[in-house]
Image: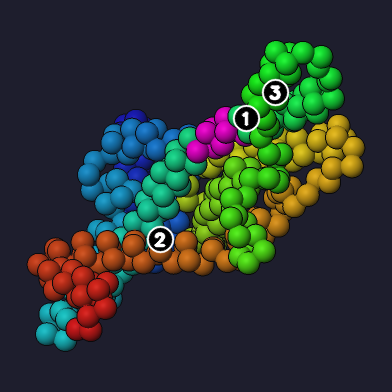
Amino acid sequence: MAGFENDGDRCMTTSSYKKRLAAVEIALTPKEWAIRLADQIRSHPSELDFLKTIAKETFEASPIIHPFRALKDQAEERHPGEKPEDVDARIRLQRAVRTEFHGLKELINTVNKAVQIQGEIVSLKAALKLARLETIVLREAFGRTARNAVELVQQHITAYAEEEERRQGVIEELAAYSYANIEGKGTDSDPFPAVFPLHFPSPIERWVDEVVALVAGVWAQRAAIQAVQDQYFDGHPILFVDVEDGLNETIKTLEDCIAIFNAYLKTRVEFFKGEPEGRLAIDVDAVRAAAVKLHTKRVAAAWIKHAKQIAKAEILAETNEHGAFLWDRLRNEFGVNP
């Protein structure tokens, strides 16, 4: 008998727990549901592990679907009547809270996908920039050696015409490899320097500009992530752990690339006395500050807009009302007022 009583007590306890849980869940806001989802995402080492875990749940109990049902129940509890005004209020609340949650869920997805895609692209570009830097450095070293050799050969006095011809040939050949130095001196193609003083960027100047653009884009993205987390998820992180690790690795790769370049500039100053480090050194802190200030809001706003549009269209699709919404969206994008 004692065993049956314990089972009964356990059943009652389980039933009571489920009732209390349902009472708590029905009061949760869309934002609180989204934070729950974000926390569940962060409890797994990767998106694949998260998906494997939720695949073991039933469709209705999954953390992606269950909040929609709970929010629907919330609207029904707040507007239980069957009068037309009650039904209308219930439908409007259902749509509002479910659209809000769906928008936040899509925002998590949008940010993660954006970080993944940019990370893959930037990582490849960073590898190419490192290879390109090595090529530029080698070219400069070879060019400097060739220029020095020209000076030495020019000082050599020949006694015979045949020897002089060979000497001139060597000078011409070396001159063909006398590349400009790293700051681009001697590379400007300006046929009218006195009238139109033009400056065409040297390879290393273009390299610097491209690397600065890459690191600025990544830092703006990281700042935008933080802004989204603070505004919509009470500071809770929303990136999958492996995606965040990838972002950190991308930033480290770029900053290592810049550190190598800046170290090379300092080596040049020490090795070639009297040559300034110049304006080519990259100030990572300054680039980061400018990127965060100038681009964070734009990046975050684009993610938020995309997520809201997806959510609204998909919720309206349930009632076959999404066609008009999509048409208005198209008209707005092309500047046509409805």
Q: Is residue 66 left or right of residue 85?
A: right
Which residue, given by chain and number where applicable, does mark 2 sit on?
303
Q: Tag 3 or tag 2, which sits nearer the N-term?
A: 3
Dominant secondary-structure state across the stretch colored magenta: helix
Q: Which of the labelled discs sits on residue 168, or is there none?
A: 3
Please determine whether, in this image, residue 229 is positioned above or below residue 45.
below
Q: What's the amino acid at mark 1?
A: Ala
Of all residues, the one furthest to the right in this rendering is 273
Q: Is residue 5 magenta?
A: no
- Magenta segment: 125-133
Q: Tag 1 or tag 3, which sits nearer the N-term?
A: 3
Q: Secondary structure at mark 1?
A: helix
Residue at (11, 85) in percent of width and height: 84
Q: Secondary structure at mark 3?
A: helix
Relative image position of residue 235 (x, y in whole percent): 55, 59
- Rounded to the nearest angstrom, the CA distance separating label 2 from label 3 is 64 Å
